[in-house]
Image: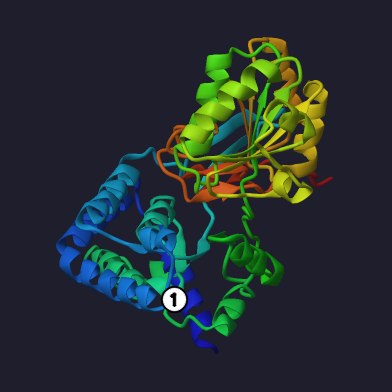
Amino acid sequence: MSDIRTLALQCRAAAQHLGQLSTQARSALLLAMADALEADAVVILAANGEDLAAARAKGVGSAMLDRLALTPARLAGVADALREVAALPDPVGEVTRDYVRPNGIRVQKVRVPLGVIAMIYEARPNVTADAAALCIKAGNGVILRGGSEAIHSNTAIAASLRRALREAGVAEAALTLVEDLRRETMLELLQLNDIIDLAIPRGGEGLIRFVAEHARVPVIKHYKGVCHLFVDDSADLQLALDLLIDGKVSRPAACNSLETLLVHADIAPRFLPLAATALRARGVELRGDMATQALLPEVLPATEDDYAAEYLDLVLAIRVVPDMAAAIAHIQRYTSDHTEVIATADPAHGEAFMHALRSAVVMVNASSRFSDGGELGLGAEIGISTTRLHSYGPMGLEALTVERFVVRGEGQVRHPLV
């Protein structure tokens, strides 16, 4: 038996025990994990320093270095995040339906843990703690496979969290960190469909496509966030401008940032000059179609690739459309099923926009930056699904459970003996 299969079997056995713990016991585990991170801060930060030094030696860019870096404040924030997850309502055991059939049997749908979740991720060492906390709170075992760039940080964080499990009498295998980072080992992990219930990749599009193409286990996919804002002809100009600036500029590298602006032709002559002035003042490069360039001659020409792009940078594609139907058609062609926004003063247009699109999050007069588990009231998220499996959109604790049927009877049989 291979090492990775052995680790996965041990994780499954630990998950079965973990899923039977009370809400109070699982929450106490998370509080102990948070305390362990703070107690081991010196060791964890030193390990992170090794990863940062190695990354700098390889010439890694500043954005990646920022995602990789832990500071005392960031590590304290990770510990606080664990405490916040501990305080969230527990979905395990929640009864979502309860009814009695004509024959007297009582039927309930009840949330139970998924089982074993494989997290495959890059760069961010905080994911080691965040993913572990969410999975354990929902009664699941978790197998963590981080990237080589954060191996020392991930190992140190996992050691602290596993010590908290051990001291609470829970098998450490409930939180398994894969330290063998060879691609062959990851491929083998993704084949274990008899042990692993779900794989969640977090990282660049290349990583997610690799996992999706090679896995035999179910995969939550989130390739990219090509998010659109459509400014309707009825929109309040200031409201639309606020949504645009927040959505594009507040954190351009986030997957819920805006990448394309669509503007109704009737409002474009008034809105686009305002938008261009505000965006350029904030360092945004603009690329537009011919109608946009007619209003803003200095804008660069937009290509088909621009409208399909997830820039994750201060770049915005613009198109002027004749009506809402054209805006919807554009989004349907280029969407990544992440988040779409309409700015409108017409409630009927908002409803029509919402019903015409099938993206995971559709917003009327609200910033795309709210497309986030914490902002939507989930408390925390383990990722964002643009795959229509059991979960779609930001994934919180509920998404780490499934509903099963529990049936109670008094001896009823379907086919009585005659």
Within 10 angstroms of label 1, few (less than 14), some, or many (20 or more) residues? some
Quadrant housing the N terminus: bottom right
**In the drawing, does residue 402 fall left or right of residue 166?**
right
In the rendered image, the vertical position of residue 257 relative to residue 196, given as above or below? above
Quadrant housing the C terminus: top right
Residue 185 can be seen, yes or no: yes
Pick the residue in front: 40 or 390: 40
Residue drawn at (52%, 35%) of the image: 280
- Occupied quadrant, residue 200: bottom right
Disc 1 on helix, strand or loop? helix
Pick the residue in front: 106 or 127: 127
Residue drawn at (53%, 17%) of the image: 239
Residue 235 locus on image (x, y percent): 63, 14
In the rendered image, the vertical position of residue 225 relative to residue 369, given as above or below? below
Q: Which residue is mark 1?
A: 148
Pick the residue in front: 313 or 108: 313
Q: Please, which residue is most extreme toward the front here?
A: 297
Residue 260 locus on image (x, y percent): 66, 37
Pick the residue in front: 120 or 170: 120
